Amino acid sequence: MLQASFLRLISFFFLIALPLGRSSTTLNVPKDIINQTCQKCANQSIILSYKLCSTSLPTVPVSHSANLEGLALVAMELALENVTSTLAIIEKLLDSTSLDNFALGCLADCLELYSDAAWTILNSVGVFLSGNYDVTRIWMSSVMEAASTCQQGFTERGEASPLTQENYNLFQLCGIALCIIHLATPGVPYSQLFHR
């Protein structure tokens, strides 16, 4: 998809350009930075999955040579890919004749939430690349909230959501991105990681 290709291009540019301007997290990139980072994130939060982190980040080839900032971009890229594929699933489900009006209403809400999330992630990448990690954290937190809101729309009435796995994955990927941004930001207390 166009958005994913755009984000891969930004990630590639970022991974090449960043070592020229930053030194703290770019010069000595450990070989196992993905596992170390995922373990730190899982240890710092009861909601983040080490397994999802350690299996998702390596699927983007540049992650193996990335620094912390590059891994944050990879997590944002994966979140955007999740949003894009979920939008396609929602559109397909909205065409289904087997769903009741309540489920269709929930799906329409999720469509709006996920559409907004796509733009929020794209804008977050730009803000992140400009060095404004605080705004990036706020915006990525709002994408996490969108996944939760989509899920809660179904569960409020005891309905099973057809998007449970997609909502979970988006929530996790945004949480991983937030954690990595936190790790890359010196002097920010962990309590500010999930800023709202």
Image (tube, rainbow, N blue to C red):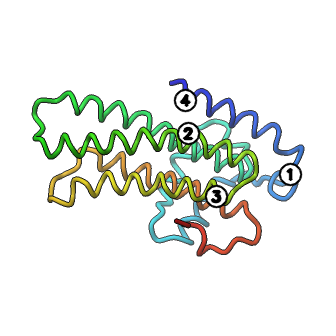
Residue beneath disc 1: 22
The circle drawn on residue 59 is 2
Tell me which corner region of the image, top left, top right, bottom left or bottom right, holds residue 134: bottom right
How much space separates mark 1 and mark 4, taking CA atoms?
27 Å
Question: Would residue 34 appear left or right of 92 to someone viewing this image?
Answer: right
- Type of amino acid at the residue the image marks with label 1: Arg
- Assess whether mark 2 and mark 3 are in contact (beta carbons under 8 angstroms): no
Identify which amino acid the numbered label 4 is placed on. Answer: Gln
Q: Are marks 1 and 2 in contact (CB under 8 Å)?
A: no
Badge 3 marks a residue whose secondary structure is: helix
Left or right of 123 on screen, residue 89: left
- Give the mark, 1 or 2, whose residue is nearer the N terminus: 1
Q: Quadrant of residue 14?
A: top right
For numbered disc 4, what is the local secondary structure? helix
Image coordinates for residue 123, horizontal then vertical, percent:
60, 42
Q: Earlier in the sequence, mark 2 or mark 4?
A: 4
Residue at the image point whose x is 72% and y is 34% from the top: 12
Comes first in the chain, label 3 or label 2: 2
The numbered mark at residue 3 is 4
Residue 196 on image: x %, y %: 52, 65
- Residues at marks 3 and 4 touching, judged by CB atoms closer than 8 Å: no
In space, the residues marked 2 and 4 are separated at their CA atoms by 17 Å
Residue in view at x 61 percent, y 46 percent = 124
Vertical arrangement, residue 192 with respect to residue 157, above or below: below
In the rendered image, which residue does mark 3 sit on? 180
Taking depth in this image into account, of 71 and 149 the one nearest to the observer is 149
Residue at the farthest top position: 2
